[in-house]
Image (cartoon, grey):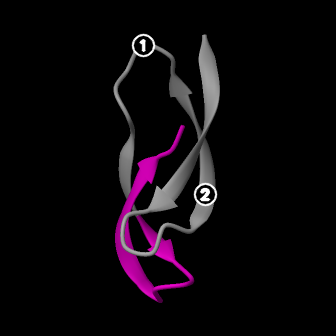
């Protein structure tokens, strides 16, 4: 079963993106563009 997760920027903490993830896996980390930082940063799954 897949669940919807929210991704937050590691630099500023703003929650910009949402994606789908498997329930059994660890936290998702993706490199995405942050509008607040105005650069590509690592975004991590939040609770």
Residue at horizontal 54 percent and vertical 37 percent from the top: 47
Furthest residue in direction bottom, as rendered: 38
Residue wearing tag 2:
17
Instruction: Specify the segment rendered in magenta.
Output: 32-47
Secondary element under disc 2, as helix, strand or loop, is: strand
Residue 18 drawn at (x, y percent): 63, 49
Residue 8 drawn at (x, y percent): 50, 58
Residue wearing tag 1:
24
Magenta span: chief secondary structure: strand
> Would residue 31 appear left or right of 17 to someone viewing this image?
left
The verdict on residue 10 being magenta is: no
> Which of 47 and 2 lies nearest the eye of the viewer?
47
Image: 5 above or below 21: below
The verdict on residue 34 being magenta is: yes
Residue 16 drawn at (x, y percent): 61, 64
Residue 3 drawn at (x, y percent): 63, 24
Do the residues bearing badges 1 and 2 touch, measured as CB atoms within 8 Å? Answer: no
Name the image quarter holding the N terminus. Answer: top right
């Amino acid at each position: 079963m897949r669940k919807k997760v929210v991704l937050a920027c590691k630099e500023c903490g703003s929650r910009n993106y949402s994606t789908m993830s498997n329930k059994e896996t660890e936290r998702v980390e993706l490199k995405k563009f942050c509008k607040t930082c105005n650069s590509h940063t690592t975004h991590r799954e939040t609770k």
